[in-house]
Image: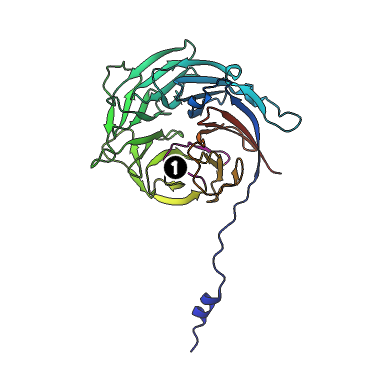
Amino acid sequence: MKNSSSDSALHSPPHQPEIPTCDWDFNLSAVISSSASSAASDAIGVVEFDHTNSFLATGGIARRIRIYNAQKFLSRENDNDGAAGALDHTAACEFYMCTPAKLSSLKWKPGSGSRVIGSGDYDGVVMEYDLEKRVPVFERDEHGGRRVWSIDYSNWDPTLGASGSDDGTMQMWDTRCDAGGKFLASVRPNRVACSPVCCVEFNPFGGVIVAVGCADRKIYGYDARRMVEPVFVLDGHEKAVSYARFLDLHTIVSSSIDGSLMMWHAEDRRLIRRYRGHLNTRRFVGLSVWRSGGLLSCGSENNRLFVYDKRWGDPIWVSGFDQDHQPPPPDQGFVSGVCWRQTGEESCTLVAGGSDGVLRVFQGQRKS
């Protein structure tokens, strides 16, 4: 006797993957570069808008924190032929401050009125700078000289900060204590091996959870009030986790040098979606999420900028030519830092920094 249900299954059409659609028009609106011949040594490692979205800070190899007034490059109109507006770092930058070491991380301190910014550097030091007085006001060296990859501040208690380092620890500290003050807590996510901590982010929606991404391929979530054990562990990446960003109160997006982004429901420890298309096998190429628009962005080691819609696993937009999926030549640059401006829902701004020391500003408009 013929099994009708089996026959139906055999002849049913195979599942077709959903094809991503781009609801946005993106355009390059400004290029900020340097006229100096040594621009190649000015690689940008981090790009950060402040909490008011009025100022932009960059840092990297050049041992400088540059501060930009966003209106200077947002008000630039494209030339008549459609070319992006060109600016020089000297003219576009409000001011800069020299730092003792190369910078790996920058974070604006909540509640400071865009006056205070913190940094983590290659010498293992965490510092804060008063941007009005343009002087350092806080310094900690708790990681034994091992490189600090990431720092962040708590939004529910801005005096609380955290740093992750090559020494395999994430440390929490009170910015009201002087340099000799003891850290509040120290955790080693991987207790078996010394696995570098590559990223640290407090929940920006006011929660008490801090996400920690490690070279052991995992993301650990800790309750900042009790750091004894992680409250969740997200395990799915094939190589080191380089970034972890909160998209909303319960959703985390992570990036890895396995060449993928992943979106997780943290409380359920559930992988929602994996994103692929960019090239990332060994470098930090940046990760930023535009929360109100549901867009993700990262750099790539083939010198391209990628934008993903959280609904689709494939990119919806790539700056430059279509990628050929081939390894870049040794002398080719890469996109090393990205940041969305967290404003609006119908228009957006994305800033990307590269290993060539150039900032590129992209404007997006939702299609009607």
Q: Is 362 on the left-hand or right-hand side of 136?
A: right
Q: Toward the viewer: 68 or 174?
A: 68
Coordinates of residue 147 in the picture (x, y in percent): 34, 28
Q: Amino acid at mark 1?
A: Ser
Q: Is residue 153 visible?
A: no
Q: Which residues are magenta?
A: 278-293
Q: How many residues crowd around disc 1 within 10 Å: few (fewer than 14), some, or many (20 or more)?
A: many
Q: Toward the viewer: 7 or 198?
A: 198
Helix, strand or loop at label 1? It is: strand
Give the vertical position of 51 relative to 297 (above or below).
above
Q: Could you tell me what secondary structure mostly forms the magenta stretch?
A: loop
Q: Is residue 241 visible?
A: yes
Which residue is rendered at x = 39% and y = 41% of the image?
241
Give the vertical position of 52 relative to 253 (above or below).
above
Q: The C terminus is located in which quarter?
A: top right
Coordinates of residue 125 in the picture (x, y in percent): 34, 22
Q: Kindly identify which residue carries mark 1.
A: 255
Q: Toward the viewer: 227 or 278?
A: 278
Residue 361 falls within the magenta-colored stretch? no
Give the vertical position of 74 relative to 1 (above or below).
above
Coordinates of residue 63 in the picture (x, y in percent): 44, 20
Q: Is 82 on the left-hand or right-hand side of 116?
A: right
